[in-house]
Image (cartoon, rainbow, N blue to C red):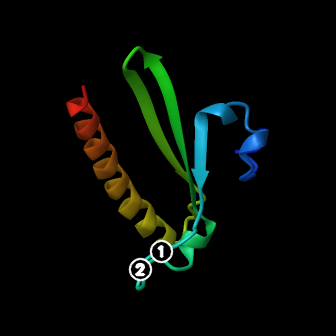
Amino acid sequence: MDGAARGDRSPRRWPDACKLQRSGDTRRPAGFPFPNAIQRMWSVVYVEAVAPGRTRVREVSLGFDADEESQKMREFFNQGNATTLKRLQSYFAKVP
């Protein structure tokens, strides 16, 4: 079992650490609707060059539990992250 599967948040132990950036709960807006669930959640962003001028970006969120708050937060981030990735794609499609 690798570090990610054990819940190890230390990227230096992951086999593809050179391709990822991780973030945890550093700050959230006042009134964030999932104050307990966010404490157990983190995200990994994989950035991989696939061809000259082309990059694959993949975001993975981890640390969700089966409880209602965590599942609602998961849906919240699924929608928000999809929107963010579409906006990034649109932005970079315009860059020469």
The picture places residue 29, in percent across and down from the top left corner, at 42, 78
Quick one: which residue is furthest to the bottom in this view? Answer: 31
Residue at x 33%, y 57% (from the top left corner): 80
The correct choice, above or below, for 90 with respect to 30 in the image is above
Name the disc covering residue 33, or none. Answer: 2
Residue at x 32%, y 56% (from the top left corner): 79
- In terms of secondary structure, where does tag 2 sit? loop
Q: Nearer the viewer, residue 14 or 65?
A: 14
Where is residue 66, by image quadrant? bottom right
The picture places residue 24, in percent across and down from the top left corner, at 60, 61
Taking the image as shown, residue 53 lies to the left or right of residue 93, namely right
Residue at x 27%, y 43% (from the top left corner): 86
Q: Which residue is mark 1?
A: 28
The picture places residue 59, in percent across and down from the top left corner, at 47, 44
The correct choice, above or below, for 10 with respect to 69 in the image is above
- In terms of secondary structure, where does tag 1 sit? loop
The picture places residue 7, in percent across and down from the top left corner, at 72, 53
The correct choice, above or below, for 70 with respect to 11 in the image is below
Q: How many marks?
A: 2
Quarter that holds the N terminus: top right
| First in residue order: circle 1 vs circle 2 | 1
CA–CA distance between discs 1 and 2? Answer: 10 Å
Q: Nearer the viewer, mark 1 or mark 2?
A: 1
Taking the image as shown, residue 60 lies to the left or right of residue 81, namely right
Where is residue 52, by image quadrant? top left
Residue at x 28%, y 51% (from the top left corner): 83
Q: Residues within 10 Å of mark 1 (few under 14, many from 20)?
A: few
Q: Nearer the viewer, residue 75 or 32?
A: 32
Amino acid beneath label 2: Pro
Quarter that holds the C terminus: top left
Name the disc covering residue 73, or none. Answer: none
